[in-house]
């Protein structure tokens, strides 16, 4: 693959920072308040919002949809990501006897149709298979994707939590690229930098999306007694940045072009994380943070 092609798959329609909607129920906001948060996120340059069928025990997509109905002009300005493939044991799904994965054609198509009804949208900009399913039949997923594409219900496809060989298997059945792999990446969880996941994204020009980029909030509260906490506090003084801004800048510095999926519901925190895009971490700052996070220097 030439350099000209690599990178082109990182679709400029999606903002570099993404807002995750998983915790929307914890935000304790009215639909009008959520709509106002989305509006302010858009003003900050965040146009992409991450959902999944199962979030909030199958309730989050409907809550997000209520916000869009409260402020109808938002719908045309946003990019929607949703996921399917996990089947929870839930009062909302009494037919599920056990938590399992379902990547059958029927489940994928039905899940997307349901997500669109809940959100009140005509199309998902990106659909991700939420987790690799040991029973995944790549041909069958390709059929489901084909059907959703032909009907115009989904614009782009990707995966989440896939290792490179699982990504390759599904990609081998498609004649268009998977555009994203959403994986856990943060200072507290850097495996994707070493297990080939981000190398593959860089090689193919796939958009890596980092879920829980602040370790679910733990990085913002890293103790000043921990090695990482001390390094973040010291670098924060030198670079005039907060620990969470440093943690986001650390992800953005990676050459695979990581797209952090932020989880805060507080606009003032979102604003600070957006500002982290201006921070320039040199190579040695980056490695200082890696060393502090892993508790050892590189070999
Ligand atoms: N694909 C997958 O398997 C998968 C798995 C998990 C999550 N996700 C996606 O990733 C998104 C983000 O995950 P996450 O919520 O764990 O992300 P995160 O950004 O690591 O954590 C967000 C949490 O940290 C808290 N927090 C505390 N102090 C903060 C500060 N100073 N700045 C920002 N946040 C602070 C937030 O609370 P406040 O709201 O009070 O700020 C919120 O509860 C989810 O919404 C979901 O869309 C995907």
Image: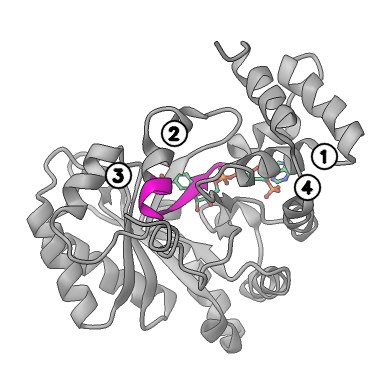
At a point 53% along the width and 58% down the height, the residue shown is 21
Q: Which element is circle 1 on? A: loop
Look at the numbered disc 3 and say if its residue's Cβ is closer than 8 Å to ligand 1: yes
For marks 3 and 2, give the one nearer the viewer. Answer: 2
Which mark sits nearer the N-terminus, 4 or 3?
A: 3
For the N terminus, which image quadrant? Answer: bottom left
Q: Nearer the viewer, residue 209 or 84?
A: 209
Above or below: residue 250 compared with residue 10: above
Q: Which residues are magenta?
A: 201-212
Q: Circle 4 sits on which residue?
A: 279
For the C terminus, which image quadrant? Answer: top right
For marks 4 and 3, give the one nearer the viewer. Answer: 4
Q: Is residue 266 left or right of residue 147?
A: right
Q: Nearer the viewer, residue 270 or 278?
A: 278
Q: Circle 1 sits on which residue?
A: 242
Q: Is residue 232 left or right of residue 30?
A: right
């Amino acid at each position: 693959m030439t350099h000209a092609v690599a990178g082109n798959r990182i679709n400029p329609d999606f903002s570099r920072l993404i807002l995750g909607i998983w915790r929307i129920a914890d935000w304790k906001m009215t639909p009008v308040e959520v709509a106002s948060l989305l509006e302010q996120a858009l003003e900050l340059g965040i146009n992409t919002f991450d959902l999944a069928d199962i979030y909030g025990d199958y309730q989050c997509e409907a809550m997000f949809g209520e916000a869009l109905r409260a402020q109808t002009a938002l719908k045309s300005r946003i990019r929607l990501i949703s996921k399917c493939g996990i089947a929870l044991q839930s009062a909302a799904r009494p037919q599920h006897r056990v938590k399992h994965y379902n990547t059958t054609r029927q489940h994928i198509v039905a899940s997307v149709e349901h997500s669109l009804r809940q959100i009140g949208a005509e199309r998902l900009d990106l659909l991700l298979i939420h987790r690799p399913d040991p029973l995944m039949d790549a041909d069958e997923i390709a059929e489901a994707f084909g059907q959703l594409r032909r009907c115009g219900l989904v614009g782009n496809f990707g995966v989440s939590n896939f290792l490179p060989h699982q990504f390759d298997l599904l990609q081998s059945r498609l004649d268009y690229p998977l555009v994203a792999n959403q994986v856990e990446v943060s200072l507290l969880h850097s495996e994707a930098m070493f297990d080939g996941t981000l190398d593959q994204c860089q090689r193919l020009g796939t958009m890596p999306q980092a879920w829980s980029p602040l370790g679910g909030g733990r990085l913002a509260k890293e103790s000043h007694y921990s090695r990482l906490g001390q390094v973040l506090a010291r670098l924060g003084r030198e670079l005039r940045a907060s620990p969470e801004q440093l943690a986001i800048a650390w992800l953005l510095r990676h050459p695979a072009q990581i797209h952090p999926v932020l989880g805060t519901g507080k606009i003032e925190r979102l604003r600070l994380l957006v500002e982290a895009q201006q921070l320039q971490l040199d190579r040695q700052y980056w490695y200082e943070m890696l060393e502090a996070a892993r508790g050892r220097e590189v070999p």
